[in-house]
Image (cartoon, rainbow, N blue to C red):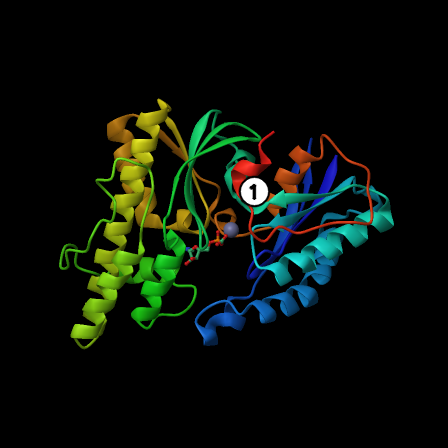
Amino acid sequence: MLVLGIETSCDESGVALYHTQRGLLGHRLHSQSALHEPYGGVVPELASRDHIRRVLPLVRNLLQATGVELAQLNGIAYTRGPGLAGALLVGASIANALAHALNIPAVGVHHMEGHLLVPLLEPDPPPFPFVALLVSGGHTQLIEVERVGRYTLLGETVDDAAGEAFDKTAKLLGLGYPGGAEISKLALQGQPGRFKLPRPMLKSRDLNFSFSGLKTAVAQLVRTQPLDDALRADIARSFQDAMVDVLAAKAWQALKQTGLNTLVVAGGVGANRQLREGLAILGARAGFRVFYPRVEFCTDNGAMIAYAGALRLRDPRPPGLGFSITPRWELADIMS
Ligand code: KG4
Ligand code: ZN
């Protein structure tokens, strides 16, 4: 079965072709980060309009490069939610219009299920069951994954998402958007331990997270002293060390609580080098293995939607004219 995947939930237009026997045939991505950079965050209306411009040329380019004809497709997967309503509508309309014209099924995929399953595309995939740490711009969740479609939410953020905390802190430090990768780069030059930043909810017995206090602590530091390059780097370092401590400790707690020894880290913050190093050290000491998707599939992409869609399309429904998006959608609601 050959599936075209279309991702348009936020500020990346991603398309990919996944074949259930031949694997991932290719993918294309257009990031809107330069478009939103001057505003310091995603402007939803601009995001929708840009998706309209980008998706079909990306699909055409991908088909051409892989030598695939539209008529060979067996199904189309698109991100149904969660995400920005207007942006989701673009992908959903294109996917459903194409599917209708080709008389093949279209399937709406949960964006976080895409993040969660994409590590299975790697040559050394994680074995089920596992604990997934999903850390993106909009979500921070720990999920017990028994198998495809069987997810139990163990804990999540009560306020800002991890990526959001990186982005807001980057903004306070006068860095560009999105800020996660910028902070990671800057922190390499920072002196560790110069600032004692809070590790929110580290000692709470549950598996929830809270990051807004950490961001406020950074805001306070920035307000009370003039920023120079060295100070920026030291703050970035202290902030990141606090994030890594909390994420790693909670992930370990989730493994202990479930009795599992496989951790999957996915979502944009999973690209963070220091988080990877921190988890590798902890994993070696505590006896668990950590799996990631390749770095380009940590952030939003079409491959994760094509893959999750192909798994869902094994049980196809007939194509119809109606479709819907779900801008707010809990992963637990898609249990099968
Ligand atoms: O998964 P993603 O592309 O989009 C959402 O579904 O939200 O994640 C984007 C988030 C942004 O907040 C970005 O700053 C963060 O991932 N991010 C990083 C890194 N690369 C991207 N955070 C920390 N370190 C990185 N290297
Ligand atoms: Zn995402």
> Residue at coordinates 30% horizontally, 70% vertically from top-left?
172
**Which residue is more in the foreground, 216 or 127?**
216
Q: Quadrant of the N terminus?
A: top right
> Up-down: is 78 above or below 20?
below
**Element at badge 1?**
helix
> Residue at coordinates 37% horizontally, 55% vertically from top-left?
160
> Up-down: is 112 above or below 283?
below
**Which residue is more in the foreground, 150 or 233?**
150
- Mark 1 Cβ and ligand 2 under 8 Å apart: yes
> Label 1 belongs to which residue?
114
Q: Residue 201 appears at what percent x and percent y? A: 25, 45
Q: Residue 316 appears at what percent x and percent y? A: 75, 34
Q: Residue 196 appears at what percent x and percent y? A: 14, 55
Say which amino acid is labelled 1. Answer: Gly
Instruction: Evaluate whether residue 252 shows in this view.
Output: yes
Q: Residue 225 appears at what percent x and percent y? A: 16, 75
> Up-down: is 90 above or below 24?
below
Q: Residues within 10 Å of mark 1 (few under 14, many from 20)?
A: many
